[in-house]
Image (spheres, rainbow, N blue to C red):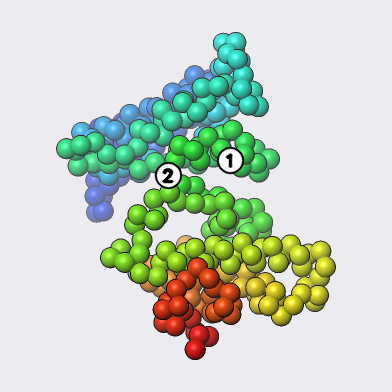
Amino acid sequence: MSAEACALKQTDRGFCKHAVLEHVDEPVIERLLTPRAALTAAEYLAFDLDYHVLVVMTDMTAYAEALREVAVLRGDVPARKGYPGYLYSDLAELYERAGRIKNRRGSITMIPVLSMPSDDITHPIPDLTGYITEGQIVLGRELSNQGVYPPVTVLPSLSRLMKDGIGKNFTREDHPHVASQLFASYAKALEVRGLAAIIGAEELSDADRRTLAFADAFERRFINQGEDEDRSIHETLNLAWDLLSMLPPESLIRVSEEELAKYHKGAA
């Protein structure tokens, strides 16, 4: 479907779906041109027709492989793992086409999707993508095998914009502290889980067992969210305090005394 046809095909929600497809068995040059063609269509819809456009680009790993193939044929000097030294600037040229333009009402939001070869987040493709984009959501095979949906691996996931859009007058005053405490408590719980795998859960202290129970509940109740579940931000924050209440108040050092007194169910 052309960009013009897409723009004219409006739905009850005021948007339409536009897909630019390319298969892995297509010529390399087509694999390199496809994301640029998609972004050109998105720019037309956003900046000429004032749409708010979401661009989902998958899989950028296949794109980078095509770029490496062309670089080898051209005789370019290889960098890490054989990828060309300009991989960073090439990816940035694509990712940084997202955003807004002054005096234009439309916008482009981009979600590049990629797979990590050998599950290595330090591989050049995810590593450079993480430098360019404003955040990353890492999906884990282990959580998926446990039936957790979406299987978001919390610790390597991040948002560089979250701090500017949460807290008082945005979500709730305790949001930044709760997010930091959940992150720290879950990181500690994963350390305890690793220890339990070595010495056995029965050898853990009572405090470590509570921490281990927190990790299980965090994955089962907080990360796990059904496709049809509509959980508001306030419901999510209340759920976070339910989980943090499994831990003793004295171990929660990233939230204030006032927040503990107000929200922690075990606080005096």
Which residue occupies the extreme right position in the image?
199
Which residue occupies the extreme bottom position in the image?
268
At a point 42% along the width and 64% down the height, the residue shown is 176
At a point 54% along the width and 62% down the height, the residue shown is 183
Label 2 residue SS: loop
Q: Position of residue 135 (x, y in %)?
A: 46, 47
Q: Is residue 105 left or right of residue 234?
A: left
Looking at this view, is 6 or 71 the one in front?
Answer: 71
The amino acid on which the numbered mark 1 sits, given as a three-letter code, is Ser
Where 254 falls versus 13 (above or below)? Answer: below
Q: Is residue 141 left or right of residue 254?
A: right
Mark 1–mark 2 Cα distance, whole angstroms, equals 18 Å
The answer to whether any part of residue 229 appears in the image is no
Question: Which label belongs to residue 115?
Answer: 1
At a point 51% along the width and 22% down the height, the residue shown is 86
Question: Which label belongs to residue 194?
Answer: none
Residue mark closest to the camera, 1 vs 2:
2
Looking at this view, is 58 or 16 the one in front?
Answer: 58
Q: Residues within 10 Å of mark 1 (few under 14, many from 20)?
A: some
Label 1 residue SS: loop
